């Protein structure tokens, strides 16, 4: 692609070689790229506005354990219970550390399916700040007949 400012000298030179100068820039590729980007942004903006629907799968295996476990229960309304006793989130780490039932420094969190994520996140943050291991309790899915 060649551009010429002085049209008289450039045209004489190109006539000798059999070519002509290009006096305008081709904007078609630029318009194509802009339209593709516009379509991509329109599609992703809609997904970001409404969010993605995610259904967390159930697990297939269940590990039986006979030892006493530290369990934090979270109800639908966000109330906390440590081993069936009500507890405040500010006292949760101290209560877990004071409990002598479990040998490990580990807590299982069992939350209701309809619980919002905020109380769960607060409990996990509180326990990890206190250097306590956190595990989440899930329900086994026996509805799938295919076994591996």
Image (tube, helix red, strand yellow):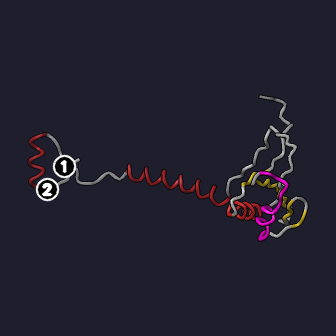
The first of marks 2 and 1 along the sequence is: 2
Residue 145 lies, with reference to residue 55, above or below; the image says above
Residue 106 counted in the magenta span: no
Residue 64 lies, with reference to residue 87, above or below; the image says above
What residue sits right under mark 2 in the picture? Answer: 7
The crowding category of the residue bearing disc 2, from other C-alpha atoms within 10 Å (few below 14, some 14 to 19, many at least 20), is few
Magenta span of residues: 89-103
Q: Is residue 43 left or right of residue 77?
A: left
Residue 17, quarter of picture: top left
Total numbered circles: 2
The image position of residue 108, as x and y in percent, is 79, 53
Image quarter where the C terminus lies is: top right
| Viewer-nearest residue: 128 or 68 | 68
Q: Which mark is residue 77?
A: none
C-beta proximity under 8 Å, tags 2 and 1: yes
The crowding category of the residue bearing disc 1, from other C-alpha atoms within 10 Å (few below 14, some 14 to 19, many at least 20), is some
| Viewer-nearest residue: 65 or 46 | 65
Residue 95 counted in the magenta span: yes
Q: Is residue 113 visible?
A: no
The image position of residue 102, as x and y in percent, is 82, 53
Measure the C-alpha gap from mark 2 to mark 1.
8 Å
Q: Is residue 52 left or right of residue 80?
A: left
Q: Is residue 18 visible?
A: yes
| Viewer-nearest residue: 129 or 33 | 129
What residue sits right under mark 1 in the picture? Answer: 21
């Amino acid at each position: 692609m060649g551009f010429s400012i002085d049209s008289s000298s450039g045209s004489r030179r190109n006539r000798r070689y059999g070519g002509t100068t290009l006096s305008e820039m081709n904007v078609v590729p630029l318009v194509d790229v802009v339209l593709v980007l516009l379509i991509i942004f329109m599609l992703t903006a809609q997904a970001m506005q409404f969010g993605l629907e995610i259904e967390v799968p159930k697990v297939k295996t269940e590990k039986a354990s006979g030892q006493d476990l530290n369990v934090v229960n979270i109800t639908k309304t966000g109330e906390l219970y440590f081993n069936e006793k009500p507890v405040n989130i500010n006292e949760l780490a101290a209560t877990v550390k004071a409990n002598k039932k479990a040998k490990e420094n580990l807590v299982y969190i069992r939350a209701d399916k309809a619980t919002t994520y905020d109380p769960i996140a607060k409990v996990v943050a509180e326990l990890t700040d206190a250097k306590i291991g956190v595990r989440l309790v899930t329900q086994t899915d026996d509805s799938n007949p295919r076994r591996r």
